[in-house]
Image (tube, grey):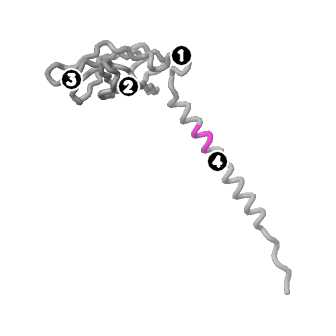
């Protein structure tokens, strides 16, 4: 009986491991590069993006009974940014009645935008408006 040919499986395993390792390393580099492009441009700002948004008016429309919050958004970061803003409407007793969301796109550094977040839920009481979340992403 002739001797068995030498086993090549260890060499094949080594090649496969090197190829897979390279793919994993490239994927890691791609993730780091992607996260670096969408990170918050004002991450060193102690107030964060929430400091960019101010409520200028808070009211319930007398005819529709829909609450609304008028907002001024100032981009305090160094890059053009997109914003997603959430506002809640609270009764005098502290009960959350409803919420609203708005978005602003491509706001230049230092630029101010005026916007309104309104809900289609009718309320009978006066409301207090509170900003609950602000997301700022470099455009």
Side of 10 where 85 appears, left or right:
left
The numbered mark at residue 24 is 4
Q: 135 or 60: nearer the eye?
A: 60
Q: Residue farthest to the left?
A: 63
Q: Residue at x 35, y 24 (%)?
A: 87
Q: Which secondary structure class fits the magenta region best?
A: helix
| Secondary structure under the numbered disc 3 in the rendered image | loop
Image: 59 above or below 86: above
- The magenta span reads 27-31
Q: CA distance from mark 2 to mark 1?
A: 18 Å
Image: 26 above or below 64: below
The numbered mark at residue 46 is 1
- Residue 139 x, y percent position in the rendering: 43, 27
Q: Residue farthest to the bottom?
A: 1
Q: CA distance from mark 4 to mark 1?
A: 35 Å
**Within the magenta stretch, is there residue 20?**
no
Q: Residue farthest to the front?
A: 93
Side of 4 where 95 appears, left or right:
left
Where residue 33 sits, quadrant-wise, is top right
> Are the residues tagged 4 and 2 within 8 Å (C-beta)?
no
Quadrant (top left/top right/bottom left/bottom right) for the N terminus: bottom right
- Residue 6 x, y percent position in the rendering: 82, 72
**Label 2 or label 3, whichever comes before in sequence order:** 2
The numbered mark at residue 85 is 2
């Amino acid at each position: 009986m002739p001797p068995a040919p030498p086993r090549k499986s260890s060499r094949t395993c080594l090649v496969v491991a090197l190829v897979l390792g390279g793919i994993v390393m490239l994927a890691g580099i791609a993730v780091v590069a992607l996260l670096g492009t969408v990170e918050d441009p004002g991450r060193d700002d102690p107030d964060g993006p929430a400091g960019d948004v101010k409520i200028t008016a808070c009211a319930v429309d007398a005819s529709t009974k829909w609450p609304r919050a008028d907002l001024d958004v100032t981009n305090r970061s160094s890059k053009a940014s997109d914003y997603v803003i959430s506002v809640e409407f609270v009764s005098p007793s502290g009960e959350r009645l409803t919420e609203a969301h708005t978005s602003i796109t491509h706001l230049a550094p230092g630029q101010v935008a005026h916007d309104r977040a309104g809900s289609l839920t009718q309320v009978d009481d006066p409301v207090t408006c509170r900003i609950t979340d602000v997301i700022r992403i470099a455009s």
